[in-house]
Image (cartoon, rainbow, N blue to C red):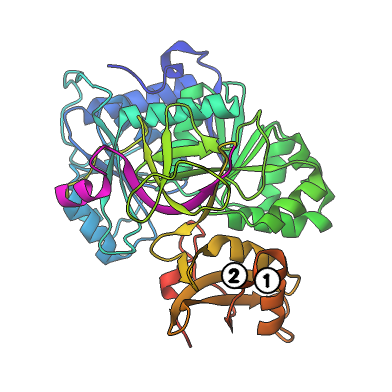
Amino acid sequence: MSSLFPALTEGPADRPALRFGDRCLTYGQLAAAAGATAGRLRGAGRVAVWATPTLETAVAVVAALEAGVAVVPLNPKSGGKELGHIVADSAPSAVLTAPGTELPSPVGDLPRIDVDPQATVASTQEAPGAPDAPEAAVSPEDPALVVYTSGTTGPPKGAVLPRRAVAATLDALADAWQWTGDDILVHGLPLFHVHGLVLGVLGPLRRGGSVRHLGRFSTEGVAGALTDGATMLFGVPTMYHRIAQTLPEDPELAKALTRARLLVSGSAALPVHDHERITAATGRRVIERYGMTETLMNTSVRADGEPRAGTVGVPLPGVGLRLVEEDGAPITSYDGETVGEIQVRGPNLFTEYLGRPDATAAAFTADGWFRTGDMAVRDPDGYVRIVGRRATDLIKSGGYKIGAGEIENALLEHPGVREAAVTGEPDADLGERIVAWIVPADPQSPPTADELADHVARRLAPHKRPRVVHHLDALPRNDMGKILKRALTRG
């Protein structure tokens, strides 16, 4: 069987692998703990993992992958209805969790395997398979993970990610980011999603490096880990926004960030003004990358490339990327202005939506390109700039195709705006009019609609100015910090 983590057997056994708070495992200890659990999983089919930000979650996922068993990560914050759907849809043989964890129904009704990273064997109430089950032959096309989408247009769908996709994405990122076993990654991301689990835990382990998980994100935790030798920081825009806000009053944080080899933001667009504030305070630039549950990573700004704020860089090695018109015709000349839908293909893609052949077929073109639903423009030198989702962020106004993302960035450059989201709503004259949803920096003195319209028109173009402005106390967001635009309605 080909391991996704050669360092478990080939590297120094005393090399640090995982640290969660004060708890840590070397590669030798991880190999022993994962091996003990893997012995109980072979032949189990799919297993669920109660994906808390803990050492147990990391050991459980590594154990299952070493056993050739697909993992279904479960978000502990999911409601009962969503958990019920995922458990029924994926039909896991068991759930892996830390000893003593109280699991809600229906997860608690599954056979349970307690994972104890400090023990030589994992205790179990009713484990499928036998400890002496023969080691299964595993191919690159076999499932590694079944990760459920956010379900914004219906019940969540399980994207089946093969071992090939995990390896291809992590190896492509190693090339783009010059990522090696000498790197120490720090982050505080949840472990039920691609960003925190695949990139943030499996990534360092595939390189033979180390990960320090904060458990819960804090600027103090980031500063401490970077000061103590961490070389890379992964975060989402809400985390980098907190960093940008804290920097003026925290010189130790600024000093710590200058020590990082790489600052990476993902899962949503990082506003340009946060890029600029972090660079002004530290001299360092945050780089962005672009991926999806179904595709893992597609593009990134390279460590040896130009860190161009507002872009997600260039396609990763092995990834094909094109922009297409509404009728599916490929855009052949990139000018940095023409908006098209991103389509991708390559070894990083999922194989199917579990049990949904209709949805799987609809997601691909006849010639094998995956329809991302993301809209972007591409510069002549290949850099990609995301302007929004086709379903919620492409606004057709006055004969123009306008991406909400660039208007949001312009609004965030106004000193009176703390947060911003842009949507379109029907307009008898324009087709759609641009609507801005604003969280003011000072609720007692919010910027006026005319002031914001003039601000955007000066920076972009008159046809991109908002026609309507709503003021809010906060924007609705999901667990990954993405704005839930479908929750924005006229009030």
Q: Residue at x 38, y 47 (%)?
A: 51
Estimate the x, y position of residue 173 in percent, counting from the top left: 51, 30
Estimate the x, y position of residue 397 in percent, counting from the top left: 49, 72
Q: Is residue 93 visible?
A: yes
| For residue 329, above or below residue 38 | below
| For residue 469, above or below residue 244 | below
* Distance from the alpha carbon under mark 2 to that under mark 1: 7 Å
> Quadrant of the rendered structure where residue 185 is?
top right
In primary-sequence order, the first of circles 2 and 1 is 1
Q: Are marks 2 and 1 in contact (CB under 8 Å)?
A: yes
* Residue placed under numbered mark 2 in the picture: 464
Q: Amino acid at mark 2?
A: Lys
Q: Is residue 110 visible?
A: no
Instruction: Please say whether residue 364 is one of the residues in the magenta stretch.
Output: yes
Q: Residue at x 61, y 30 (%)?
A: 184
Q: Secondary structure at mark 1?
A: helix
Q: Nearer the viewer, residue 309 or 127?
A: 309
> Quadrant of the rendered structure where residue 3 is?
top left
